[in-house]
Image (cartoon, grey):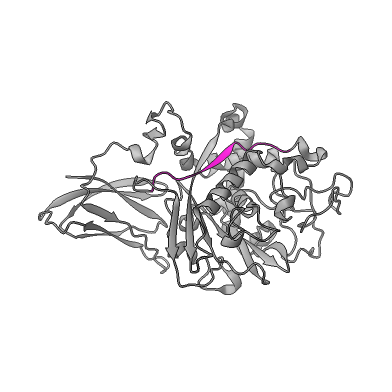
């Protein structure tokens, strides 16, 4: 189950919620995974790592933005991408200018997540990059998984494959429908509990019409970049602030809507989602007295201009998710902090950073093409082939040994393959979900 934010009748809405009571009945395996992750999160929140202050250092998240477009308007500018990265850094560092709009009753609960987002400087092969890719498509619109039983749901992630999801936050920006029309989507995200089972689809997808705060982000309700702030919150393990115990239309089922929880202690209990821009204080059946509910929280459904805070409890939860589920990404955090750390051989360079691996580089006339192929047949091994392309068309000899690292999450293994000119490497990889390939040596 993914989170998909849908624009219905001029409002922010989600077509797929994390309703634990429903999941317990309909998807017991997913429910168990969520509970297992929740136990690990609580272990870090209550354990010595948090008490020692280890969760307080700045976490830098390498980001790659995949722009998938059919029209010129969908092919958003680099400047629009930069504006979104700036919004994320403002919101997650509590540097947003509208933080002054946080009511005094909640101001002491608002905090700095000390998480920063940096466009990737190197791709999975160690090549320099802007952190932005562009792909033309003939497809007019994309959809989230299981959207109205669409078999092509989540298709944008298979049209443009993700970079290593244990190293990068992948953001796809594409057309998810016209926001001026009922049913247009603004974005959706994958929860961290699905990282092991669905690493291919880890990341977030944002409608080009509400990405950043300039260019095509023109809708006055969603032109401040808060859609990405909200969705990345889900990617980091945050749930909706009201606990997703209501129906998709915001109404309550036969029981009350005060039993659900976002698993954060310092957010008020809330009956259902908020739309537009409520006046403070707003009370409901779950928080009937002032200050009421926290409609200005990034994990509610208020308009962009009315969102301005994460709570300290939400921040601790997001940071704990790195230790509970996204630990490998922390190894790449120092690659983007702009200083020479003890483990690095230079500024943003060292054993933890892809561009600084000490290997014999392949000759410039050769190129390793990467192919990720997901087998759709249940209980059949996944078959992957990798081609080494001879760009110069020169004869490389009958026997050339290439050392190819196959990155298989969670365990890496390395194999040597004997290849000839323009040869194919063909692997039956078993039953795992994701592999990537890096040419790290030649002989």
Q: Left of 102 or right of it: where is 388?
A: left
From the top left corner, tell me how far across and down residue 13 is, in percent.
69, 62
Q: Is residue 213 magenta?
A: no
Locate residue 385, reporting x and y percent.
Answer: 29, 61
Determine whether, in the image, residue 224 is placed left or right of residue 278. left
| Near-viewer residue (67 or 274) | 67
**Residue at the right extreme, as displayed:** 289
Q: Give the quarter of the image for residue 275.
A: bottom right
At which x and y percent is residue 123?
Answer: 38, 48
Quarter of the figure that contains the C terminus: top left
Q: Is residue 245 above or below residue 415?
A: below
Name which residue lies at 19% across and 60% down. 422
- Nearest the viewer among 383 and 390 is 390
Q: Residue at x 46, y 50 (%)?
A: 165
Could you tell me which residue is drawn at 77 percent across and 53 percent down? 259
Quadrant in which residue 95 is drawn: top right
Range drawn in magenta: 110-123
Magenta: predominant secondary structure element? loop
Q: Is residue 63 above or below residue 209?
A: above
Quadrant placement of the N terminus: bottom right
Q: Is residue 409 visible?
A: yes
Of 58 and 406, nearer the camera is 58
> How far across and down, in percent of the image, does residue 313 sit?
69, 39
Residue 183, picture quadrant: bottom right
Residue 160, visible in the rendered structure: no
Q: How many numbered tags mark residues here? A: 0
On whether residue 114 falls in the magenta region, the answer is yes
């Amino acid at each position: 189950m993914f989170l998909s934010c849908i624009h219905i009748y001029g409002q922010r809405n989600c077509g797929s919620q994390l309703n634990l009571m429903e999941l317990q009945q309909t998807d017991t395996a997913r429910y168990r995974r969520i509970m297992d992750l929740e136990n690990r999160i609580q272990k870090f929140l209550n354990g010595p790592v948090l008490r020692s202050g280890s969760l307080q250092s700045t976490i830098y998240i390498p980001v790659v933005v995949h722009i998938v477009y059919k029209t010129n308007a969908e092919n958003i500018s680099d400047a629009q991408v930069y504006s979104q990265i700036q919004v994320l850094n403002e919101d997650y560092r509590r540097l947003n200018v509208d933080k002054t709009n946080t009511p005094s009753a909640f101001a002491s609960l608002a905090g700095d997540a000390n998480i920063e987002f940096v466009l990737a400087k190197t791709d999975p092969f160690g090549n320099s990059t802007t952190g932005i890719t562009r792909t033309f498509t003939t497809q007019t619109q994309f959809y989230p998984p299981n959207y109205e039983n669409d078999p092509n749901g989540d298709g944008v992630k298979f049209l443009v494959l993700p970079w290593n999801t244990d190293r990068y936050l992948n953001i796809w920006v594409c057309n998810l429908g016209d926001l001026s029309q009922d049913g247009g989507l603004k974005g959706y995200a994958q929860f961290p509990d699905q990282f092991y089972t669905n690493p291919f689809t880890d990341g977030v997808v944002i409608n080009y019409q509400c990405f950043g705060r300039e260019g095509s982000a023109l809708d006055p309700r969603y032109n401040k970049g808060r859609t990405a702030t909200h969705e990345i919150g889900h990617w980091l393990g945050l749930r909706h602030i009201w606990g997703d115990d209501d129906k998709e239309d915001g109404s309550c089922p036969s029981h009350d809507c005060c039993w659900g929880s976002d698993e954060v202690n310092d957010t008020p209990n809330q009956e259902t989602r908020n739309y537009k821009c409520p006046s403070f204080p707003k009370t409901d059946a779950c928080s009937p007295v002032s200050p009421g509910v926290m409609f200005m929280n990034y994990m509610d459904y208020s308009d962009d201009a009315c969102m301005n805070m994460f709570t300290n409890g939400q921040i601790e939860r997001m940071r704990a998710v790195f230790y509970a589920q996204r630990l490998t990404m922390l190894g790449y955090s120092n690659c983007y902090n702009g200083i020479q750390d003890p483990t690095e051989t230079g500024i943003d360079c060292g054993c933890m950073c892809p561009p600084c691996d000490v290997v014999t580089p392949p000759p410039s006339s050769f190129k390793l093409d990467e192919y990720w192929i997901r087998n759709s047949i249940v209980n059949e091994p996944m078959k992957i082939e990798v081609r080494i392309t001879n760009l110069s068309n020169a004869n490389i000899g009958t026997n050339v040994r290439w050392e190819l690292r196959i990155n298989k999450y969670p365990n890496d293994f390395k194999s040597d393959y004997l290849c000839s000119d323009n040869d194919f490497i063909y692997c039956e990889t078993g039953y795992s979900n994701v592999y990537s390939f890096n040419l790290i040596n030649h002989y």
